[in-house]
Image (spheres, rainbow, N blue to C red):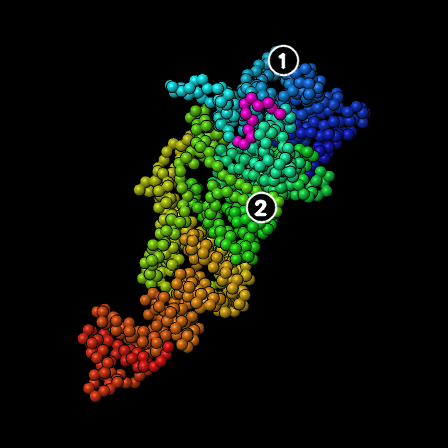
Amino acid sequence: MVYVNNLPSILWELLFENNQKGEARKWRVLGQEQDGSMLFTWIHICAENPVPASRIGIYSHQNNTLKTVYCFDNIVNTIQASVNADQTLLAFVTKDVEINENVENDPENTKIDMYKAYIVEINTKEKRQIHYLNIARSKQIMVQFLYRKQRKIADRNSREKLVFFIHQEVVLLYNFELTRNLEEDSDWILDKDIISSECLARAFIWAQWDPIHQSLFYIHFRKPVKSLVEGEESDKNAEDIRSSPTLSGLQFHDDLPHETVLNIPLNLPQLPHAGVKPCGIYADDVIPLRIHDCSLDLYIASDPRGIVCICHHYLYEPLESITVGQKEPTFSGNNQIGTVHLAYSITLLHHGCVLHCVVPRIKWTDAKAIRPTFSLYGDHHMIVFVPGLFTHLLDIGTSHEPMCHIVTSPCIVPCIGGGGGGTGLDTQYHIVPLINYGKNVGINLINLDLVELNVTTSQLIETFKSDSSADNKIAILHYLLVHQSEFDSVGELITILADKPIPLTMTKVLKEFLIAGAYATSLRNLPQDALQLVHLLPISTMTSSKDVEVKINKNIQVKLTHEVLWNTAMMLLSPQQRIVPYRGDMWTRLWEQLSNISKGRQRFKTSQVSDKLIISLVCYQPEALSRCSTPLSPGGASLVGSTSFGEIASSLGQSRKYADSLPFYEIETCTASKQEHVISVNLRELSMHLLKQTAGTTATGSTTISFGMKGMWQTQQTPMHVHAVATRYVAAQLEMSKLLCHLLCRSVGIQSRNDSEKGFLLIDQLDDQTKYILFTLLERYYLCVESLAFPLPQGFNSFFAFLGYRVLSFSMFMQYVKRNVFELQVDVMKIIMADISDTKEGMARKLKLLSLLPRSRAKRLLSQWSHPIALMIRAREHALNVLSGVEGQQPRPHSLQRTKTNQLGLAAFPSADRLSPLDTFLDLLTAKASLTDLDFGLLIEATIASTEEFL
């Protein structure tokens, strides 16, 4: 949160520029209109006339002007005001202390606050008389002009509408007539004889005016519908049937009658019940314009895209200290220290759910002064600023479910004196957001300081570094990847995470990096008509139904829970029921958002691929596959039309520049790698999921066209759109996998360059501590990638296996191999076989490794192993094939056979009767196969080698 400026200082400079010299003090904001202009009152003392008097002015931030619209003759306690669109009429409300005439009925209150409303003509050549609306109440009164289209220059008459609020009584709509004489170029004059009014609502307990959308929200009590079922008891006590609080919404139009677009029963904590006496204490909130007493602190934030959030702030005591019938905290029993629970709930109508946030054990003296700030932040978030405690960044956008919420430390706002931020629990802030006043700018109503409601990247990085909550780390990483696209900052977070690789929470955060990063990367360069399919892609590892608990420090703990509403769309006026059917506004977009939720479309889950890979990898044989049959083969089929994978990957953004900086060579010796197999399964499963979840797709690939709710032609998805989204997402999976591997290796100081060593030589150059840290990081990385069924970079398996061979003991290394963590490719087996000495222990280790390899891979390695043990194994394999009837090709002479000048034959092991065991065995083989199929040299040399002791 950034300090902008002090508004009274700006206003005083404007007064000085307008030659209104003197002294101006006690500035007070009276309201804000639709165009962003703000109304102020202040006490002005002129140099010529030392008598102080109140003035009302309109400040325009866009034009940087302050226009004085009315000057009183004395000091008037004006608390709220509103001006019409042409600034010809000013309505304002005063609040004065008067003697209670009904002292007998209320002897405790001898003095009461009395609200009165007035209206006056402005922009006139002479000072006009103030018109009293003849209404005075001890209950809160507020006024607000409706905005309409600009009147024409030739108009002689004009009608203005004023919404008049009386708390607990009525909402009225006044109609005023203005006339003027065009021939004399006279000002607009109010016709006092033509004033009419109509009732909009009765007996409301809370109301709020939305100036942007010209909407009115109010809460009233509605009796439940009586049952007409016969036989039901009719003599029930009337007190058992309570009226339920209901939130209603009125939408006003320029030239049409208003309409009720919303009726939602509320079930919020500590809502006042029907018949409960109001507290009678008013805060007089004018930005936004709200009419309520201290019994209900509610605020509604809305956005033209169809976002409606109901924010409710309240306090309650811990359960163990509650006394039946207690109204005020007494802090008896177990609650001796005087603490309460500070809580707020945010009802997201556009998602059909409620987010409950509780901060337990806050001192009552501090909690009663806290006024949280609720403001829409950017396109996808709501910022909740709780002074002195924390800042909450809630994910409430329409692009995906609300699930990744961030809790950070409280932002520092300059003190009232302007001397820097305060310490401790400072509650001298009541910040409200302003409309059409820059980006995320709010005003502190206590001292009229302008502040920027902002959560900086540096603040998020500090929270990520100091917080131990995995959910908060995941939310911060998700925010920077999906909503901010700050890859450099994300790289810094991964480096921070790699400093402590042992906790298992690291794996959860790395999974979020892969899922959120793949989603964000795949959005780039997609066709505009295929963007609707991205709502079916996985976006986060978090779920909206998961409870979140974050500790800010030792004393402050934030608990967030999620609750689903039932059938929210039934409480909203459908587009065809509107006065102008299918008119595009906030309410039709809200209806469309709820309709999309009701369709029940499911996002793609990586577990769908993981389940398939469990089965398919059992029979996976890389040596038997062809490269041209896999989708990302370097010479095989391209992903999108004639576009190669390299072109697609290069268009995916910043992640591509990291993919070429891996500490190993991206090559594998097998004809079809496991990477390509995983990619092909991902591509197939994702394409099928998109096709099943997309309605209106035909088998021939044509586009289904329908007349949509918005009154425009809408095209639905075709198989080509599905193919484009699926291929880009799969390509993004591989790129994010490479990027994460690069970031983890970079965090331990490994910077791969063209002139530096890579692969096995790089591992041998590292010291033991760096090897161990790198192995721990890559082990976490491997677990994340495998569990999410993401593809690993080519060459990683061999690099990871050799690193594990250097770091782990041989027995532990064998456990990793047996559990399929290490994949022993030919390249890594060659260097491991060469590294193991030919001692008895070394020979036993080599045989154990060979026994775990596939038959074809083991045969290739045996043929390159110039050792008698290899001869014996190959000879046994050869004899087994002959005796089992397997017909092989013409055997090629083995390496030892080529070194002999004479052919060894039946003369081996001579005896008197020429019937040695070898002779008998060779006779048996010749009976099973022809002489051309037998490798006599291999068999005889293996027999000779078997007489020596090698093991």
Q: Nearer the viewer, residue 932 or 920?
A: 920
- Residue type pointed to by label 2: Lys
- The Cα–Cα distance between marks 1 and 2, rounded to whole angstroms, is 61 Å
- Provide the residue designation for mark 1: 192
* Mark 2 surroundings within 10 Å by alpha-carbon count, few (fewer than 14), some (14 through 19), many (20 or more): some
- Farthest residue toward the bottom? 912
Residue at the spot 45% in from the left edge and 31% down from the top edge: 568
Q: Amino acid at mark 1?
A: Lys
867 is higher (above) or lower (below) than 627: below
> What is the number of the mark on residue 737?
none
Of the 4 image quadrants, the one containing the C terminus is: bottom left
Instruction: Please rate how many residues cluster around mark 1, counting C-alpha atoms within 10 Å: few if below 14, some from 14 to 19, many from 20.
Output: few
Q: Is 270 within the magenta?
A: yes
| Residue indicated by mark 2 | 551
Name the image quarter holding residue 76.
top right
Specify the segment rendered in magenta: 268-279
Q: Nearer the viewer, residue 296 or 906?
A: 296
Judge by depth and name the residue closer to the eye, 107 or 456: 107
